[in-house]
Image: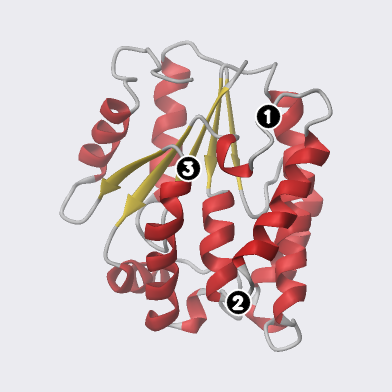
Amino acid sequence: MAKYICLEGTEGVGKTTQTQKLVDYLTSQGYKVLQTKEPGTPLEPLTMTLRGIMLDNQYDKALTRPAREFISQAIRSIHLERVIAPAITEYDYIVQDRGILSGYAYGVACGNSFNNIRNMAIQNVQSANDTNLFDIQPESIYDFVVYLRGDSNKGLQKALAAKQEFTAGDAMESRGNSFIKQVSENMDNYSSYFNTVRIDVDGLSIEEVHGNILASLNLSKGTFNGK
């Protein structure tokens, strides 16, 4: 059974960089590793199409609050059922950039009810769980959530300065500092619902953060302190 690790955090804290470094490290140790992400993964092209509709700023005014959440949940349903469930028995590790914690934090910041979001997440997990590979609770499907926490305002400015995925901009980043600060506060709150390792990244180099991740997960010698 694969060990399932999800890296989380707000904009610009280094999730994608640290996801890649963790994948590279585990691969160098001889493990079979699946690298994936939410919302939207090239492993399932339809999820990338849905990601564009959900996050491309050109669609922002047309989307209603529930519509964006329904798209987010559709992406997660496809990802869990078509990518994660088959991989659980085929890989040693699954390493994911963003997941359900981000879904909670951003979804609530967008004005949706936490209970509604979680109920949809439960349905997604149950649908993907035909062979009883997952715990029934969405917060328990990951062995670890690595929460990279940094200054939300500085992170947003870093993200905005980077090459943009969408010509019209990212709909979440475009909401500004107050929105991202609320997302960060939501992550602080909801991260306690998961088996979370929190790493404060401000002032640390990329290599220092990577070393802290390996140490926190007891991976520095190719071992895993999982469930």
Q: Quadrant of residue 150?
A: bottom left
Quadrant in which the N terminus is drawn: top right
Residue 204 as seen in the image, left or right of residue 26: left
Compared with residue 140, is residue 131 higher up or lower down, i.e. above or below? above
Q: Nearer the viewer, mark 2 or mark 3?
A: 3
* Residue that carries the numbered disc 3 in the rendered image: 194
Kind of residue indicated by mark 3? Phe
Q: Residue at x 74, y 70 (%)?
A: 53
Q: Is residue 165 something that shows in the picture?
A: no
* Residue that carries the numbered disc 2 in the rendered image: 167
Q: Earlier in the sequence, mark 3 or mark 1?
A: 1
Near mark 3 (Cα within 10 A), the count class, few <14, some 14-19 or many ≥20, is some
Question: Which residue is at the front of the view, 22 or 191?
Answer: 191
Residue 209 as seen in the image, left or right of residue 74: left
Real-space Cα separation, disc 2 to disc 1, in angstroms: 38 Å
Q: Quadrant of residue 19?
A: top left
Kind of residue indicated by mark 2? Thr
Q: Which mark is residue 156?
A: none
